[in-house]
């Protein structure tokens, strides 16, 4: 090993004892059980439901409470206590309202603090003390450690000492803060690491809040979904991606995300929309049954929705023309329209166009943007690229994200690995070279990162490629032959709406296919799993999220409210701890308020995907690999510096 590095390292470990301590510490960690990984996907802006899953650790919090309190507490008390751990601030307030004298309240505090301490002690039993310390609320570390490590083994005088500490906390008015801190510590201990397998954005109302929660989360990685890439593309300079995100926000009545949350001025778009568009049933925003919308506002959104959709269709055309290898010429739909008859020819069949809104289209050159449209999209792009909040969120998405992830022997991917009918990796020609499988995904990611690093370029291959990731035939995120957005707005015949899925989606049922893919990514086909999002599992129709004899796990059960009627549940999540994997199905999440009042915890059935014969240790994980390397470097330092 290079002695220069060792000399540098010796500045940090400047005495023998420090090196020895660190080696012993790392070796100890390697032999502890592996931490719990938590997998979620397809959050689609549903912050409240996501929050709930994060806070209850997909049921792990309650499980731990039951482990230690099942025999001592009633079911109702367990529910109450669990709710307190999930939403401490609100639950404390509610409980406080129930007490009419201080003495009772103080008694409650002291019981709860003791319960919390016991729970933390149990939940942290597989971690080192140093890791636990990092999870404790800063202002109470000393006090909590005193309470945690109390032991009566050698002295009988300690009980009053601890009782005194708790009493002091209460009488100094610190109990609420302490209980809240302990609750968050519990949540943090229950899940060691979070994987978000794509699609944070679109459809739901609060993707920004999800981003904030992820930014503040102790340990997370993200596998981008097609919707996330659309937002990244918009920020990276792709006007067509930008048109898409605004169109989807208009469609789901979420324009306030663009305007209020990210501070992007929609006024120029509104002016254009007011000038050229009227009411149009195909473009009215989807409004959830518990929302209300004023007629005037609805009309405005309907107009914006049309204006931006037409801009989007126009912007697609030059990209399709300048990128023949995208093989998308079939999607040059504006050119297939007979604007007088209001008809379109698709695959040699003529269809009437319903709800047309082509006032800004010149039939001779249908993809030409009006000067006004050009200005609108340019201004929008400027605004998007100068939104500080969006910049913060997109930078985080880039930093923590990737197209796929190999983690602890598993492959995490939002969409698919494009396959042909025979199960071979499909090839795509990019700049005269063919790419398939892992190489194809790697080159996609390189283009995305390049585009993101060069936001001033709007028409280069890298930027176009980001849009391809959203909608292209060989995109690992889209996984369908073509996106039929135009047909869905304008053609009644539903057969034209169908988006043919990549063969991957039926071949993934077979073990053989999954093994082949795992091998392609240099993972052990006998041990590994593919963890997939993107396609809602229709439990309602008897679809099983666990496929290929457990090698394929699909966790998109539909957090998205818009899709819950087709899935029948409200999302799957996956847990992977030292004992194995558990798939958790969540029932519909109504509201935090309901949980607070009734303790309704909407999660249910667990299915064991895999049961480890022996508890898995940190040593056998990705983190373990890194720690082993550190041990080896520190051993070299020890020999070089201190054992001569
Ligand atoms: O239901 P919506 O919002 O109209 O969206 C339909 C579109 O969404 C997509 O399914 C992509 O979104 P998902 O990644 O959530 O599946 C497209 O294939 C389809 O055209
Ligand atoms: Mn998706």
Image: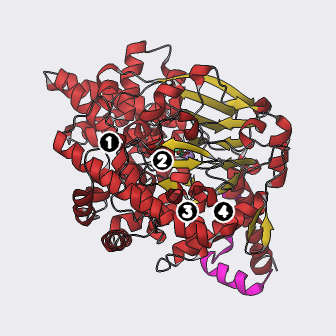
Task: Report how far apart the C-alphas of labels 4 and 1 lie in the structure.
Answer: 61 Å
Q: Is residue 579 visible?
A: yes
Task: Report how far apart the C-alphas of labels 3 and 2 lie in the structure.
Answer: 27 Å
Residue at the bottom extreme?
4
Q: Which residue is mark 2?
A: 343
Identify the mark nearer the N-term, 4 or 3: 4
Q: Is residue 14 magenta?
A: yes
Of tags 2 and 1, the one toward the viewer is 2
Residues in magenta? 1-25
Q: Which residue is mark 3?
A: 467
**For mark 1, does the 10 Å Cα neighbourhood hold few (<14), some (14 to 19), or many (20 or more) residues?**
many
In front: 624, or 333? 333
**For mark 4, does the 10 Å Cα neighbourhood hold few (<14), some (14 to 19), or many (20 or more) residues?**
few
Q: Which residue is mark 4?
A: 21
| Residue 611 percent location from the top left of the image | 75, 29
Identify the mark nearer the N-term, 4 or 2: 4
| Residue 505 percent location from the top left of the image | 71, 39
Q: Which residue is mark 1?
A: 285
Identify the mark nearer the N-term, 3 or 2: 2
């Amino acid at each position: 090993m290079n002695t220069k590095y060792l000399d540098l390292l010796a500045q940090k470990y400047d005495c023998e004892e420090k090196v020895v301590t660190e080696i012993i510490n790392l070796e100890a960690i390697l032999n502890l059980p592996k931490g719990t990984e938590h997998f979620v996907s397809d959050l689609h802006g549903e912050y409240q439901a996501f929050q709930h899953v994060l806070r209850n650790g997909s049921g792990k919090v309650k499980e731990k409470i039951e482990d230690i309190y099942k025999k001592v507490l009633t079911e109702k008390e367990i529910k109450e206590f669990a709710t307190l751990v999930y939403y401490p601030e609100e639950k404390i307030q509610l409980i406080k309202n129930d007490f009419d004298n201080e003495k009772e309240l103080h008694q409650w505090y002291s019981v709860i603090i003791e319960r919390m301490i016991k729970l933390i002690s149990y939940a942290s039993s597989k971690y080192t003390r140093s890791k636990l310390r990092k999870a404790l609320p800063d202002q109470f570390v000393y006090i909590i450690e005193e309470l945690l490590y109390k032991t009566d083994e050698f002295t009988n005088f300690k009980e009053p000492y601890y009782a005194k500490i708790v009493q002091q906390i209460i009488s100094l008015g610190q109990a609420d803060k302490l209980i809240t801190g302990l609750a968050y510590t519990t949540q943090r201990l229950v899940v060691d690491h979070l994987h978000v397998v794509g699609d944070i954005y679109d459809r739901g109302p609060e993707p920004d809040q999800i981003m904030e929660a992820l930014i503040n989360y102790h340990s997370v990685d993200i596998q981008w979904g097609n919707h996330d890439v659309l937002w990244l593309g918009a920020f990276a300079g792709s006007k067509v991606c930008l048109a898409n995100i605004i169109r989807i926000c208009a469609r789901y009545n979420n324009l306030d995300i663009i305007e209020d949350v990210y501070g992007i001025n929609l006024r120029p778009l509104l002016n254009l929309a007011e000038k050229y568009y009227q009411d149009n049933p195909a473009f009215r925003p989807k409004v959830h049954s518990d929302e209300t919308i004023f007629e005037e506002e609805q009309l405005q959104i309907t107009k914006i929705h049309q204006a931006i959709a037409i801009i989007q269709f126009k912007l697609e055309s030059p990209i399709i023309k300048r990128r023949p290898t995208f093989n998308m010429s079939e999607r040059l739909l504006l050119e297939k329209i007979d604007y007088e008859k209001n008809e379109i020819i698709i695959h040699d069949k003529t269809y009437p166009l319903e709800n047309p809104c082509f006032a800004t289209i010149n039939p001779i050159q249908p993809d030409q943007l009006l000067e006004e449209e050009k200005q609108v999209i340019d201004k929008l792009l400027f605004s998007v690229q100068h939104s500080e909040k969006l910049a913060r969120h997109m930078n985080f998405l880039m930093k923590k994200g990737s197209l796929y992830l190999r983690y602890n022997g598993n492959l995490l991917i939002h969409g698919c690995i494009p396959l042909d009918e025979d199960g071979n990796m499909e090839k795509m020609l990019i700049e005269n070279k063919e790419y398939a499988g892992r190489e194809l995904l790697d080159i996609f990611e390189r283009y995305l990162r390049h585009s993101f690093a060069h936001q001033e370029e709007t028409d280069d291959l890298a930027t176009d490629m980001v849009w391809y990731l959203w909608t292209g035939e060989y995109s690992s995120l889209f996984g369908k032959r073509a996106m039929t957005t135009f047909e869905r707005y304008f053609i009644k015949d539903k057969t034209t709406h169908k988006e043919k899925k990549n063969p991957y989606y039926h071949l993934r049922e077979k073990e053989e296919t999954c093994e082949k893919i795992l091998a392609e990514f240099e993972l052990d086909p006998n041990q590994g799993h593919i963890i997939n999002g993107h396609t809602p599992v229709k439990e309602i129709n008897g679809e099983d999220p666990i496929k290929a004899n457990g090698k394929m796990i699909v966790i998109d059960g539909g957090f998205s409210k818009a899709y819950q009627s087709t899935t029948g549940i409200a999302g799957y999540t996956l847990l992977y701890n030292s004992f194995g994997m558990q798939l958790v199905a969540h029932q519909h999440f109504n509201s935090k308020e309901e949980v607070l009042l009734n303790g309704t915890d909407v999660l249910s059935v667990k299915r064991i995907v895999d049961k480890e014969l022996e508890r898995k240790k940190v040593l056998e994980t990705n983190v373990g690999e890194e720690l082993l390397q550190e041990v080896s470097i520190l051993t070299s330092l020890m020999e070089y510096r201190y054992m001569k």
